[in-house]
Amino acid sequence: TPALPEDASNFIRKAKSEGRKVVLMTFSSMPVGYQRILKIAVKICHDCRIEGLRPVVIAMVKGQPQEQSQQQSLMQEADRWKQKQRLLVVDTSLDFGALFPQVDAIMLHGGLGVTCEALLAGKPTITSGILLMDQRYWASRMHDLGCGSKGISVDDLLSDDGASIVTSVEAALASGGGSWAEKALQVKNQLQAYRNAFVVVDLQNQEDWRHYHR
């Protein structure tokens, strides 16, 4: 089983020990921009509340373009949250199969692969980024399933002083009947049941084939 790097494992473990939810941000190769990712992450750290506690954020930034002008106040605020161990900025690749089951909600770009990984892990999603090609479609499918938001571009996410960020993240982290988290877990269990049924049928077919050729 793939393992996470020690810094990521320790970060998640500390958050869980404090009763805090963990939000993962990953836009893969979609060029959202390093500072825009940080701006969203800082907004989540500062303004979101779940059961009275601020969540923590893992922001994956590998391959993200650096903006020409650097916002010093943003960088300083991000550093403060890093020092409090509420923000982890990751500039390397992490195994989604190991990472996704350990977080509570995922902000992603809406590609088929990463969306499927989220479903298999049973995690609610917020689909954002630049939303190209099929990404809006998969966002709509997640919303139709009750597992996440509709697609919202990163520009729109940041356009109202971050109110959409707070609303979306708090919806993703909510629990209880009818929540995205509850529905995502139901879909995960359905997928697992289908997978198990497929394995049983496949094994039975193999056994029938062996009997036939004796």
Image (spheres, rainbow, N blue to C red):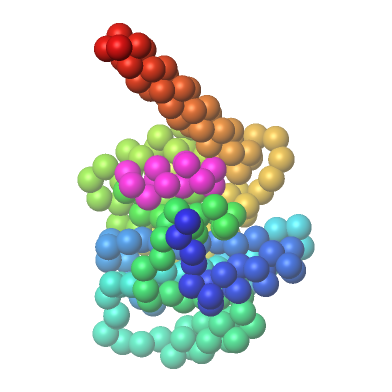
Give residue 184's quadrant in the image: top right
Give residue 9's quadrant in the image: bottom right
Q: Position of residue 49 (x, y in %)?
A: 69, 62
For the C terminus, the image quarter is: top left
Farthest residue to the left: give it.
Answer: 133
Q: Residue at x 30, y 57 (%)?
A: 130
**Is residue 59 left or right of 87 when viewed as pictured?**
left
Q: Which residues are magenta?
A: 112-124
Residue 131 can be seen, yes or no: yes
Residue 205 can be seen, yes or no: no
Q: Position of residue 148 (x, y in %)?
A: 50, 43
Main secondary structure of the magenta stretch: helix
Q: Residue at x 35, y 20 (%)?
A: 206
Farthest residue to the top: give it.
Answer: 212
Q: Position of residue 123 (x, y in %)?
A: 54, 47
Magenta stretch encompasses residue 116: yes
Magenta stretch encompasses residue 161: no
Q: Position of residue 194 (x, y in %)?
A: 47, 26
Q: Residue at x 66, y 48 (%)?
A: 174
Of residue 191 and residue 54, the one placed in the foreground of this image is 191
Q: Residue at x 53, y 75 (%)?
A: 6
